[in-house]
Amino acid sequence: MVPLFTAAAVVTGCGGPFPQSTLAPRSDFSAAVNTLFTGIFWWAVVVFVIVEGLLLFVIIRYRRREGAGEPRPLHGHTALEIGWTLAPALILVFIAVPTMRTIFATAGHAPAGALRVEVVGHQWWWEYRYPDLGIVTANELHLPVGTPVQLELTTADVIHSFWVPRLGGKRDLTPGRVTRIAFTADSAGEFSGQCAEFCGASHANMRLRVFVQPDSAFRAWVAGQRAQPAAPAPGSLAERGREDFARGACIACHTIAGLPQARGIVGPNLTHVGSRTTIAGALFPNTTEYLRRWIDDAPSLKPGALMPAIVLPDDELSALVAYLQSLR
Amino acid sequence: MKSWLTTTDHKRIGMLYFWTALVFFLIGGLEALVIRAQLARPEGIGVSAEIYNQMFTMHGTTMVFLALMPLSAAFFNYIVPLQIGARDVAFPRLNAFSYWVFLLGGLFLNASFVAGPLFGAAHLSVAPDAGWFGYANLTSRQFSPGPNIDFWVLGLLILGIASLAAGFNFIVTILNMRAPGMKLMRLPVFSWMTLVTQFIVITAFPVITVALVLLMFDRFFGTHFFVPAGGGDPILWQHLFWLFGHPEVYILILPAMGIISEVLPTFSRKPLFGYTVVVYSGVLIGFMGWGVWSHHMFAVGLGPIADSVFSATTMLIAVPTGVKIFNWIGTMWGGQLRFTTAMLFAVGFIAMFIIGGLSGVSHASPPADLQQTDTYYVVAHIHYVLFGGTMLGLFAGMYYWWPKMTGRRLSETLGKWHFWLTFVGMNLSFFPMHFSGLLGMPRRIYTYGAELGVTRLNEISTAGAFLLGVAVLVFLVNLWRTRTRGEPAGNDPWQGATLEWATTSPPPVYNFTVLPRVESRLPLWATEHHGAMAPLPATPPAPIHVPGGSWWPLVTALGLPLIAVAALSHQLWLALAGVAVVIAGIYRWAYEPFEA
């Protein structure tokens, strides 16, 4: 199946690497779905070839020919009718049995001892809470390779759908409910995903990254996230930015551990924002330029973004950006 | 002009439905082209997120409610009374009312494109923007404060009235107005599928009406049916919407299946293979369509038991559908196939519907669906079913019945261009979507990154969509040219077997000079047991009473958008005025003198 699609992709000029391909599974969940779909796909190919072949045969063989008499009026044929009712039903049994098996295997319940992560959807970004590790972060999910993971999904506003195709199928985040995804990633790497349920103006911009890491790297990341970020050096630009942050509008929406004034929960937790590779719902690289543009006028970069444009003098903006980058 | 505004003739109303739905089809097509133009490149060509979201919402809403359903209705109106040998529908004025309500509902919905300034909006357009499925709680006043969703709720409520009125009308017509001897099992398959469709309409539309009324209460009066903070449940909306929405799919496809069940026998010179099986499988699909709705909700997380049950019912519905396909192929087997444009579209329907059916089976499997739902894979699926199926079937019907409706045949040369451009265009547009979906492109996104690797696939889809646009232009030229230069059709240009071919083209206002007496399933064909029906006399032997026109269906219909505008503008007096117009219209309608 994968080679087939790769061939099709090469023919159409897309080389890959297809970061959101459902056909290149890297977890037990996505592998089970891929195996199931491959089976269904080949059944579909068989039926397609037979039925379209029959159709082609009929329209070629029975074209009107000059001089041919009136066709025999055939009203039906009971044995044939029964045959072509039972044949598809039989094929469906071959699809239904593995389907039912996979439904229960992918129902979302991880074994005891799995790493729990609470995923909270927001218009238009993702909040991740590791209740057993005391970590709160946004948009970039870090997971250890080979360890069962239990995601518990809820939403702060409207319905979203969490989807990282190479790690598993999607599951909706519904107000007032907790839904679940469980999987074990089988190889380290960076995986991209995005919201799959239409959720308003910037639905297309609600993206996410998953970093599946070897155990040691994951433990190092956990240690880094649990520590408070180092205070900026006295007199540095970053320290000025820290003062501006604490005095300004930022604290109404954002939390930064170690900055007592910053306790907002409407926007992403920024405690370690400098350690992330992307900003704004995994939409832009976490660079000086994008941070400046984002603070200056977020809605122009991301339609409907709830973070307002914040007009600041140039030096104040530079200081803020320096501070955010120091939060590693 | 006046005679068109007051007409109660099913044939004129059929033509009104046709032209109105065609205009809406073009509008929906233009919306599709905006969507495809935007997606031709990563990061788009400059359509804003807000406008894009309005475009895909209105594209879906328009194609389902304002194009495909009313194009089917055009044939219900024009053809069914002729096929069953009746002089008109059971309730001619109610029929006119249905049309006017449909027209006004469509205009009301589309008025949102230019109504922005009236609501102090920053943009001209305040069209609905939460998808044709309008999932709660995104549609709540909190998350959609503008008038956009109000237009959608009120517009669909108006359109539902049109569908319900027409549904009852055609059920009564088909059950009670059949010509002598036309037993139910002699009913042409198109009329049979119309009957099944109307039963689905009158049972499914109340469900969405309830859902829309609840949503209207949430938005206008602060109730909490779908608001979780107030104890409501947004999942309730999904159940109600899809409990309507899936039967709606069969409302869209069954008429097209009926059409090709007429076209294939005519151009194969053979009766439909397994008439009884085709009819019963249509009825069965109508029933089973009620038991599959949650397959739209596998990603919700309803639990493995519910998922298994809905997966099984969904796979089962593939069986009667497959049976129909085999029977159509059986109809052609051993025939003398004439590949007119109508026949090409009918065969195209079968070829494309197979693909849509097979991809449908793949997301009947819930785990597979967890990867496929809300991606372009599903966009590919619905377009193979609703364009490759319904739309090709409707085109087949247009080429087949246009001679009957206008007295002139559409050009076969242009028709073949139309077919092949459509066939190539749709496959170019929709087939690559299977791949872009499996490669991880979600639907309803106004932009995507180049790193996704689906740019070339999207370029191809866009090229195909514009080719479809060219195909539609060819069709319009064909329609235009046929007005004056089309070849005269005669009564029966295709040697059809059913009663509509027994009368003139176009038929006189009373349809048949004498009501035909039906002795077989294919009255105009000689079969083993029956000769062909004798031709009808050219002039009526006795005068035929034809009801005159009436203003009251139009007046009554006008009251409904008044009520909707009142709700939008919060003017109680206007609402009362609208109610007064409706009541006055019904009152005068009820007491209209019976005249010749």
Image (cartoon, coloured by chain):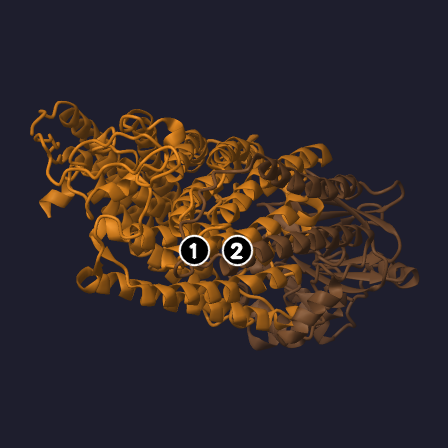
Chain colours: A brown, B orange
Quadrant of residue B14 within the rendered picture: top left
Which mark identifies residue B337? 1
Q: Residue furthest right?
A: A216
Classed neighbour count for the residue bearing mark 1: other residues with Cα under 10 Å, few (<14), some (14–19), many (≥20):
many
Q: Position of residue B81 (x, y in %)?
A: 27, 36
Between B262 and B423, the residue placed more toward the observer is: B262
Quadrant of residue A145 within the rendered picture: bottom right
Classify B505 as above or below B283.
below
- Left or right: residue B574 versus residue B192 is left
Q: Could you tell me which secondary element the residue under label 2 belongs to?
A: helix
Amino acid type indicated by mark 1: Leu
Q: Quadrant of the C terminus of chain A?
A: bottom right
Classify A243 as above or below A226.
below
Amino acid type indicated by mark 2: Val
In space, the residues marked 1 and 2 are separated at their CA atoms by 9 Å
Question: Is residue A170 in sight in this rendering?
Answer: no
Q: Quadrant of the N terminus of chain A?
A: bottom right
Between A2 and B213, the residue placed more toward the observer is: A2
Residue depicted at x 47% and y 57%: B348
Quadrant of residue B160 within the rendered picture: top left
Q: Residue furthest top?
A: B591
Q: Are marks 1 and 2 in contact (CB under 8 Å)?
A: yes
Chain letter for mark 2: A
Q: Position of residue B62 (x, y in %)?
A: 38, 51
Which mark identifies residue A58? 2
Q: Position of residue A224 (x, y in %)?
A: 85, 61
Between B15 and A277, the residue placed more toward the observer is: B15
Question: Is residue B153 in sight in this rendering?
Answer: yes
